[in-house]
Image (cartoon, coloured by chain):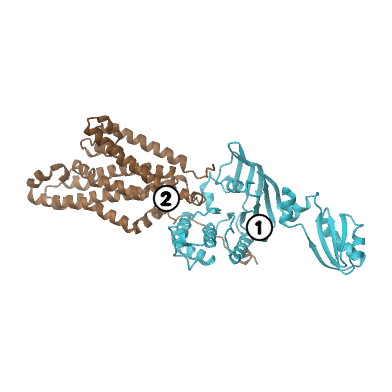
Chain colours: A brown, B cyan
Amino acid sequence: MPVHERGYTHWNPSGLAADPPWLVIARRGLVPALKKRRNLLLLFAALVPAIIKGVIIFIKARAGEILELAVGSDWTSLTPAGFMAFLDWWPSLFGFLVTLVLGPALIASDKQENGLSLYFSRPIGVFDYLGGKVLVVLAGYLAVTLVPSLLLCVFGYLVDPTAVGLELLLLTPLRLIVMCTFIGLGLSLVILSFSAMATRTVLVVVWWSILCIGGGAVSSIGDAVGLDSFAYLNFLGHWYNAAALVMSASPRIAVEPAVSLLICLVIMAAAVAVLRRRIRPVEVVV
Amino acid sequence: MIGQPPVRLEAHEVGKWFGEVVAVGNCSLEVGRGVVGLLGQNGAGKTTLFKLLAGLITPSRGRVLLDGHPLRSHVGLYRRVGFCPESDALPGWLTGREFLHMLVRLAGVERARVRGRVDELLERFELTDAANRRLGGYSKGMRQKLKLAQALAHDPDVLFMDEPLNGMDPVSRHQAIGAIRQLGEEGRTVLVSSHILPEVEEMTRRIILIHRSKVLAEGDVTEIRDLIPEYPTVVALRCARARELAAHLVRQEHVMGVECEGDSRVIVRTEHALAFYRALPGWLLESGLAVEEIHTLDDDLESVFTYLTGD
């Protein structure tokens, strides 16, 4: 006897208590990544520079200006410029590494496995999909840059008697949030656009490494031989340089921060355009 | 389904071409409740039409509507749609449970019901024991079952199944055919694409036949068979007095030819099988002959397919 004749009740989803699709996609990217020992190690390693800075802040609070003279005031200070100098140091390397670990496979593997039809045969839009993927990389980036910085703000306020609460607990964290989110979002979009263009993850790794490390290397060579215009090729440098505007810090490369900001915005727009073109809810059959 | 409005999947003059290659010509069709087989040879345009109907490819011309709305323009309509792709769209690094869990949640199932629903699907497709194994280690048949399970994750009204039995062993195949038939009996719209005719025949008698990018026939296999006058339907009758029966039948309307095979078998060719079957009891009463067995030899899907495509 057919089920409906036995009193079949159709399940009618209310959708009220369901998770938003972008969150489901983001979790699916993050949870397996956090289960890998290599990634956990990277997250813990990213805390080391913050611990070093924390120790210096602590000693400085006790030893006063002697230590400041020894290690330089920029790096150890709790000012926005001090955090800028800190983030432009090792955390920027960890930022690059974390994007390299999390980003390349996110879209490429879905395309490789023909998984897009599975996603888009469900009630989700292209922005849900992309939002979830961006969140994976962004969360990783923030975990190695913003989180240690915010912890340092709180730590600095607790150990440094000269620290101002409004600055360290509100204004500087806000600047840090804007800066790290801006850089993290930009880097996420670019690496995801690479991932959307590639069918093999290894290609994304190579492209991303060339862009980030190669760009920085070319810029350094230009700097050494007195060719400032090479600084325009410093891909990562532009993001930190643009962020210097938010952090009231000095330019990080030989380019006006406003120009870097413009370049970053153009790069972001291009990445979004690539993603819109490559990720379609309907399949592009070639 | 009782209490639910009927589902109407329509294609209006739908066409799809890629450059100069026409994948689907000018197709118009309507699919209601029950199981419908979408048939065609490799390269006939079957998969393209299938994806057009599922809203996974935009048509170059025409419209595909689910209950009067274009699927892709109303993303919420996908709450009513389940899709089982032909390709192995399974990430090898996830376990079966994780994979289903994600897709059940993406389908909009309430958070509190997700775990129960996943367990239910795993059990239904006999995957509970393998639930915590990575998909990379699944056999082809298990992967196929999982694809079917995810399509049913949110209990959809409309199901698109592209070659759903590929790679299944005979037992799993039998079970899957039963499950698909049951889905149709429950009142769902189930569109099954396949090029293996006997499999489709076990699921349904309703077909859409696509050949060289065009819909060649649509409807019940027997009715379609009846509309092919070039090939008379061949009916075999077993009767103890075969020669007398042959002599009686040869005079009747709708009978194009009769031949005897041995002493107890009569082969009749008729241009109108349904009319022949309707009239046959009267003729037998009239002649006083008893027939032990009636069997149509070529109204199966295979024959219809061959007659229509000429291949």
Q: Is residue B9 visible to the viewer in this orientation of the structure?
A: yes
Chain letter of the residue beneath label 1 in the structure image: B
How far across and down, in percent of the image, does residue A269 sit?
39, 36
Left or right of A42 in this view: B199:
right
Q: Is residue B109 visible to the viewer in this orientation of the structure?
A: no
Q: Is residue B120 positioned above or below A25 on the image?
A: below
Q: Is residue A263 positioned above or below A170 on the image?
A: above
Left or right of B263 in this view: A163:
left
Front residue of A229 and A261? A229
Front residue of B7 and A244? A244
In three-dimensional space, the C-alpha distance between marks 1 and 2, rounded to whole angstroms, equals: 37 Å
How far across and down, in percent of the image, does residue A271 sit?
39, 39
Task: Report which residue position mark 1 lands on.
Answer: B200
Q: Amino acid type of disc 2?
A: Trp
Neighbor class of circle 2 (other Cα within 10 Å; few <14, some 14-19, many 20+) is many
Task: Report which residue position mark 2 lands on.
Answer: A22
Q: Number of labelled discs?
A: 2
Q: Amino acid type of disc 1?
A: Val
- Seen at 75% across and 50% down, the residue is B307
Whether discs 1 and 2 lie on one chain: the answer is no
Neighbor class of circle 1 (other Cα within 10 Å; few <14, some 14-19, many 20+) is many
Front residue of A17 and A160? A160
How far across and down, in percent of the image, does residue A151 sit?
22, 52
How far across and down, in percent of the image, does residue A2 sit?
64, 65
Chain letter of the residue beneath label 2 in the structure image: A
